[in-house]
Image (tube, rainbow, N blue to C red):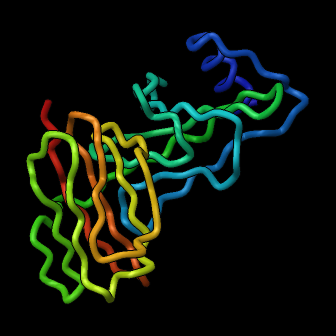
Amino acid sequence: MKNILHFTFCALILGFSNNTNAQCKPTIVMDADGHTLRTTATYLSYKWVTCPDLVIIPGATSSAYYVVKSGSYAVIVEKGSCIDTSDCMFVNPPTGINEEAISKNQVSVAPNPSSGKVYLKSPVALRGAYVAVYSINGQMQTSFILDATEKYIALNPGWHFITVDKDGWRETHKVLIVE
Protein backbone atom coordinates (compact mmCIF):
# COMPACT_ATOMS: atom_id res chain seq x y z
CA MET A 1 0.00 0.00 0.00
CA LYS A 2 2.86 2.38 0.87
CA ASN A 3 4.42 1.96 -2.62
CA ILE A 4 1.09 2.58 -4.34
CA LEU A 5 0.55 5.74 -2.27
CA HIS A 6 4.13 6.85 -2.95
CA PHE A 7 3.69 6.42 -6.69
CA THR A 8 0.24 8.01 -6.66
CA PHE A 9 1.75 11.04 -4.91
CA CYS A 10 4.57 11.11 -7.45
CA ALA A 11 2.15 10.73 -10.36
CA LEU A 12 -0.02 13.60 -9.11
CA ILE A 13 2.94 15.92 -8.48
CA LEU A 14 4.88 15.12 -11.65
CA GLY A 15 1.98 14.35 -14.00
CA PHE A 16 2.88 10.71 -14.65
CA SER A 17 0.48 7.83 -15.08
CA ASN A 18 1.24 4.19 -14.40
CA ASN A 19 -0.10 0.83 -15.43
CA THR A 20 -0.34 -0.70 -11.95
CA ASN A 21 -0.46 -4.23 -13.43
CA ALA A 22 3.08 -3.90 -14.78
CA GLN A 23 6.09 -4.45 -12.54
CA CYS A 24 8.93 -2.05 -13.22
CA LYS A 25 9.87 -0.62 -9.80
CA PRO A 26 13.55 0.32 -10.08
CA THR A 27 16.22 -0.52 -7.56
CA ILE A 28 19.19 1.81 -7.15
CA VAL A 29 22.62 0.98 -5.78
CA MET A 30 25.69 3.02 -4.82
CA ASP A 31 28.93 2.36 -6.69
CA ALA A 32 32.10 1.77 -4.67
CA ASP A 33 33.21 5.37 -5.34
CA GLY A 34 30.57 6.66 -2.90
CA HIS A 35 29.36 9.17 -5.51
CA THR A 36 27.55 7.26 -8.26
CA LEU A 37 23.99 5.96 -7.95
CA ARG A 38 22.78 3.64 -10.70
CA THR A 39 19.81 1.46 -11.54
CA THR A 40 20.18 -2.32 -11.47
CA ALA A 41 18.08 -2.79 -14.64
CA THR A 42 17.65 -1.07 -18.01
CA TYR A 43 14.69 1.22 -18.69
CA LEU A 44 13.42 3.37 -21.55
CA SER A 45 13.89 6.65 -19.65
CA TYR A 46 15.28 7.96 -16.35
CA LYS A 47 14.60 11.07 -14.28
CA TRP A 48 16.63 11.50 -11.08
CA VAL A 49 14.89 13.40 -8.30
CA THR A 50 15.64 14.71 -4.83
CA CYS A 51 13.76 13.27 -1.86
CA PRO A 52 11.40 13.68 -0.16
CA ASP A 53 10.11 16.51 -2.41
CA LEU A 54 10.64 14.57 -5.71
CA VAL A 55 12.00 17.59 -7.56
CA ILE A 56 13.48 16.57 -10.92
CA ILE A 57 17.22 17.24 -11.22
CA PRO A 58 17.77 19.07 -14.54
CA GLY A 59 19.82 17.04 -17.01
CA ALA A 60 19.96 13.90 -14.82
CA THR A 61 18.44 11.50 -17.35
CA SER A 62 20.81 8.54 -17.59
CA SER A 63 20.91 5.23 -15.72
CA ALA A 64 23.65 6.63 -13.45
CA TYR A 65 23.73 9.81 -11.38
CA TYR A 66 26.94 11.28 -9.94
CA VAL A 67 26.10 12.77 -6.53
CA VAL A 68 28.04 15.87 -5.53
CA LYS A 69 25.89 17.03 -2.59
CA SER A 70 24.69 15.06 0.44
CA GLY A 71 20.99 14.25 0.37
CA SER A 72 18.37 11.68 -0.55
CA TYR A 73 17.81 10.70 -4.17
CA ALA A 74 15.49 8.46 -6.21
CA VAL A 75 14.93 7.73 -9.89
CA ILE A 76 11.70 7.70 -11.88
CA VAL A 77 11.82 5.21 -14.75
CA GLU A 78 9.68 4.28 -17.71
CA LYS A 79 9.50 0.82 -19.26
CA GLY A 80 6.72 0.23 -21.75
CA SER A 81 3.48 1.47 -20.22
CA CYS A 82 4.90 1.36 -16.70
CA ILE A 83 6.28 4.40 -14.89
CA ASP A 84 7.53 3.95 -11.33
CA THR A 85 9.82 5.48 -8.72
CA SER A 86 12.61 3.82 -6.74
CA ASP A 87 12.89 4.05 -3.00
CA CYS A 88 14.88 7.08 -1.81
CA MET A 89 18.53 6.54 -0.91
CA PHE A 90 20.54 8.86 1.32
CA VAL A 91 24.01 9.65 -0.02
CA ASN A 92 26.83 11.41 1.78
CA PRO A 93 29.57 11.46 -0.89
CA PRO A 94 33.21 11.50 0.17
CA THR A 95 34.66 14.98 0.48
CA GLY A 96 37.70 16.09 -1.41
CA ILE A 97 38.66 15.42 -4.96
CA ASN A 98 42.05 14.01 -5.86
CA GLU A 99 43.40 16.97 -7.82
CA GLU A 100 47.01 15.78 -7.53
CA ALA A 101 47.23 12.01 -7.62
CA ILE A 102 50.11 10.52 -5.67
CA SER A 103 49.87 6.97 -7.01
CA LYS A 104 51.93 5.44 -9.78
CA ASN A 105 48.80 5.63 -11.95
CA GLN A 106 48.79 9.44 -11.96
CA VAL A 107 46.57 11.00 -14.62
CA SER A 108 46.92 14.59 -15.76
CA VAL A 109 44.09 16.70 -17.17
CA ALA A 110 45.03 19.99 -18.81
CA PRO A 111 44.41 22.77 -19.38
CA ASN A 112 42.22 23.46 -16.39
CA PRO A 113 40.30 25.67 -16.83
CA SER A 114 39.81 25.08 -20.56
CA SER A 115 37.85 26.67 -23.37
CA GLY A 116 36.32 23.39 -24.56
CA LYS A 117 38.83 20.55 -24.87
CA VAL A 118 40.90 18.92 -22.16
CA TYR A 119 43.90 16.71 -22.70
CA LEU A 120 43.94 13.50 -20.65
CA LYS A 121 47.40 11.98 -20.25
CA SER A 122 48.02 8.72 -18.40
CA PRO A 123 50.76 6.11 -17.98
CA VAL A 124 50.73 2.91 -20.03
CA ALA A 125 49.64 1.02 -16.88
CA LEU A 126 46.19 2.60 -17.21
CA ARG A 127 45.41 1.24 -20.68
CA GLY A 128 42.06 -0.50 -20.42
CA ALA A 129 40.86 1.82 -17.64
CA TYR A 130 37.23 2.98 -17.66
CA VAL A 131 36.84 6.76 -18.00
CA ALA A 132 33.55 8.52 -17.25
CA VAL A 133 32.80 12.24 -17.47
CA TYR A 134 29.97 13.70 -15.38
CA SER A 135 28.46 17.18 -15.36
CA ILE A 136 28.16 19.07 -12.08
CA ASN A 137 24.53 17.84 -12.01
CA GLY A 138 25.70 14.23 -12.04
CA GLN A 139 24.66 13.49 -15.62
CA MET A 140 27.08 11.24 -17.46
CA GLN A 141 28.44 13.17 -20.45
CA THR A 142 30.52 10.41 -21.98
CA SER A 143 32.40 7.26 -21.09
CA PHE A 144 35.04 5.17 -22.82
CA ILE A 145 37.82 2.64 -22.30
CA LEU A 146 41.26 4.24 -22.26
CA ASP A 147 43.09 2.74 -25.24
CA ALA A 148 45.98 5.21 -25.46
CA THR A 149 48.13 7.23 -23.10
CA GLU A 150 46.81 10.52 -24.51
CA LYS A 151 43.25 11.56 -25.36
CA TYR A 152 41.38 14.80 -26.03
CA ILE A 153 37.91 15.18 -24.54
CA ALA A 154 35.55 17.90 -25.85
CA LEU A 155 33.20 19.26 -23.16
CA ASN A 156 30.46 21.89 -22.87
CA PRO A 157 30.93 24.93 -20.61
CA GLY A 158 30.60 24.28 -16.86
CA TRP A 159 32.14 22.09 -14.16
CA HIS A 160 32.84 18.43 -14.93
CA PHE A 161 34.18 15.44 -13.02
CA ILE A 162 36.43 13.02 -14.92
CA THR A 163 36.89 9.65 -13.23
CA VAL A 164 39.41 7.01 -14.26
CA ASP A 165 38.90 3.47 -12.87
CA LYS A 166 41.03 0.37 -13.19
CA ASP A 167 41.19 -2.77 -11.04
CA GLY A 168 39.74 -1.13 -7.92
CA TRP A 169 41.86 2.02 -8.25
CA ARG A 170 40.08 5.33 -8.95
CA GLU A 171 41.15 8.89 -9.59
CA THR A 172 38.81 11.86 -10.04
CA HIS A 173 39.57 15.28 -11.51
CA LYS A 174 37.37 18.38 -11.34
CA VAL A 175 37.55 20.41 -14.56
CA LEU A 176 36.12 23.82 -15.51
CA ILE A 177 35.18 24.58 -19.10
CA VAL A 178 34.67 28.30 -19.79
CA GLU A 179 33.09 29.93 -22.82
Please, which residue is most extreme toward the right here?
A: 21
In front of the other: 24 or 9:
24
Residue 101 point in image, percent of width and height: 14, 76
Pick the residue in front: 84 or 121.
121
Location of residue 167 in the rendering, given as x and y in whole percent from the top left corner:
43, 84
Residue drawn where x is 43% and y is 50% of the image = 142
Residue at the spot 32% in from the left edge and 63% down from the top edge: 163
Rendered view: 93 above or below 43: below
Q: Residue at x 41, y 41 (%)?
A: 139
> What quarter of the picture does the N terminus occupy?
top right
Figure disc tally: 0
Q: Residue 25 at x, y = what percent?
A: 72, 40
Q: Nearer the viewer, residue 36 or 61?
A: 61
Q: Is residue 19 left or right of residue 111?
A: right
- Residue 76 is left or right of residue 94, and the answer is right
Q: Residue at x 64, y 49 (%)?
A: 27
Quarter of the C terminus within the rendering = top left
Residue 34, located in which quarter of the rendered image? Answer: bottom left
The answer to whether residue 59 is above or below residue 102 is above
Residue 57 placement (x, y as % from top left): 41, 28
For residue 109, side relative to residue 54 (left or right): left
Quadrant assignment, res 11: top right
